[in-house]
Amino acid sequence: MKFRFFILFGFFLILYSLLGFNLYTLQIEKGESYLKKVQARNEFLADLELKRGQIFFLDRNQNDISVALNKNYPLLYAVPKEIQNPEQTAVLLVPLIGGEEKKLAAIFSDHQSLYRLLADKLSPDLINNLEKIGPLQGIYIDTQPYRFYPFQNLASQVLGFFGINDKNSKPTGIYGLEEFYNNVLSQEKNLYLTIDRSLQVQSENVLNGLIQKFDAVGGTIIIEEPKTGKILALTNKPDFDPNEYSSSSIKNFLNPAIHYLYEPGSVLKPLTMAAGIDLEVLTPTTTYVDAGRVTLNGKTIENWNHKAYGKITITEVIEQSVNTGAVFAEQKIGNSQFYNYLKKFGLDKITNIDLPKEAVGNLKNLSRKEARAIDFATASFGQGIAVTPMELISAFSAIANGGVLMRPFLNRDLNPQIVDRVIKPETSRLVIEMMESAVNKAQVAAIPGYRIAGKTGTAQIPDFQKGGYTEEYIHTYVGFAPISDPRFIVLVKLDKPNSNLAAQSVVPAFRDLAQFIFNYYNIPPDKL
């Protein structure tokens, strides 16, 4: 009996010693290897981890709605050391994730690399197909947060996107607010915008309809609060889906509202009249005799319809959009003063909106020593100078709000900022009445019960190769309402439509948007 006891005791002693040895080997000798493996996996996933603040629009009830957030997506990665048959594993995966079998097999054979990302943002179909081929040694699925834009193309050029910087290969905000506020968002601070989602959606719908109806190549709509500079909506077409930015053309990342210059055409005439009235060299009832054309420096300027109006007032110049009337006004103002007022309206400087790489208007035709009378004359009705849509709507906001140029902004946490007083309040009132008269005369932008001010612009596109102008046009309309207390100002721009009259395209679009805004904000009528 004692002999059997000693045998059993010896057996368990040996077993315990072997177990202890294995535990020692596992914990001490191999522990460092396992620890490195765990640390490597954590570092791999940490490199992919996204910590970034959200971006919010306002909804109909003035609640915040996220338009840029972080969402968990499945990803596929490999642990090369665990893959026993690199070639066979590559053969199975290439049909699912793409690539070349040899290159993938080489990745799987690289045991110096602990982890390799194979594919991210896996679709449900791809995950299902991976599950069908069964578990593969060294191939794993995990989840990591990525930047997600739930409304896809909506305001994409305002938002920008989160991607890889070409210069340093590091993830960062690129274009739009993602770039401008990258330092804020990268600290996990949220960004709250002035944009109203309902107005943004309506603007995009209107612009899409315009482009389709008139076979245009693109366009821009901006809705702003003239008293403060708050941007309520900003849309451009064509645009892109920031979730799939790599499949889009780079030119679609640019924001035409702030990056593209264009000759605005006749929409500029109220600014010319504002300068003359502010200097007290013109009044709305000032008259002149229109012969239908005027020749300066050997070049002849005609009215758009080749018509001579005879004796007309400055108000009628705005109503009928008479080119020669704008030239008459500029000559009364004087070249130097006219140029100074265009600068005061901000057409030669950035608006300083909180978006990156804003372009600046071009008034060089007027600032050069060789500037001639014809240059100032054509500038009076918006030719030979170039502005951005944002500069233009900012200038008209100064007319709408009583004469003050405001900085436009998107970040709700910013305070309204006065840039400069451009014209006197009385000048503002008189120019508004002239613009209202133009609306009432044409009736295209008119809405029963509301006083509305507006001006069209049908501008030919310059021919930079041959000189002169092409037969293609850009249509613009800027309007605001209600005149008694302007709540909004809208700019509608349409590029290369198949119609040569803005009254047929952008003016009805403005009217539809204005009616929507009146209803949306429940703005009471101000016209008895």
Image: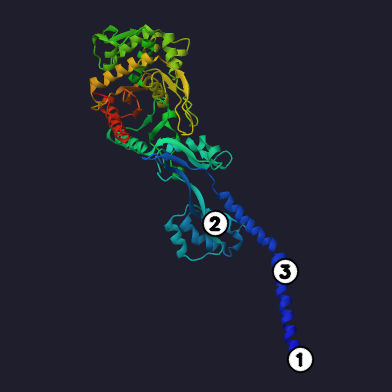
- Classify mark 2: residues with Cα within 10 Å, few (<14), some (14-19) or many (20+): some
Height in image: 370 above or below 4? above
In the rendered image, which residue does mark 2 sit on? 77
| Residue that badge 1 annotates | 2
Q: Quadrant of the N terminus?
A: bottom right
Find residue 265 and report its horizontal and vertical position in percent. Answer: 35, 20
Residue 3 visible at all: yes
In the image, residue 303 lies at what x, y percent?
Answer: 28, 14
**Left or right of 187 on screen, residue 506:** left
Question: What residue is rendered at 28% in x and 6% in y?
Answer: 288
In front: mark 1 or mark 3? 1
Q: How many marks?
A: 3
User: Is there a contact, CB below 8 Å, between mark 3 and mark 2?
Assistant: no
- The answer for how far apart the CA atoms under marks 3 and 2 are is 32 Å
Q: Which residue corresponds to mark 3?
A: 24
Tag 1: amino acid: Lys
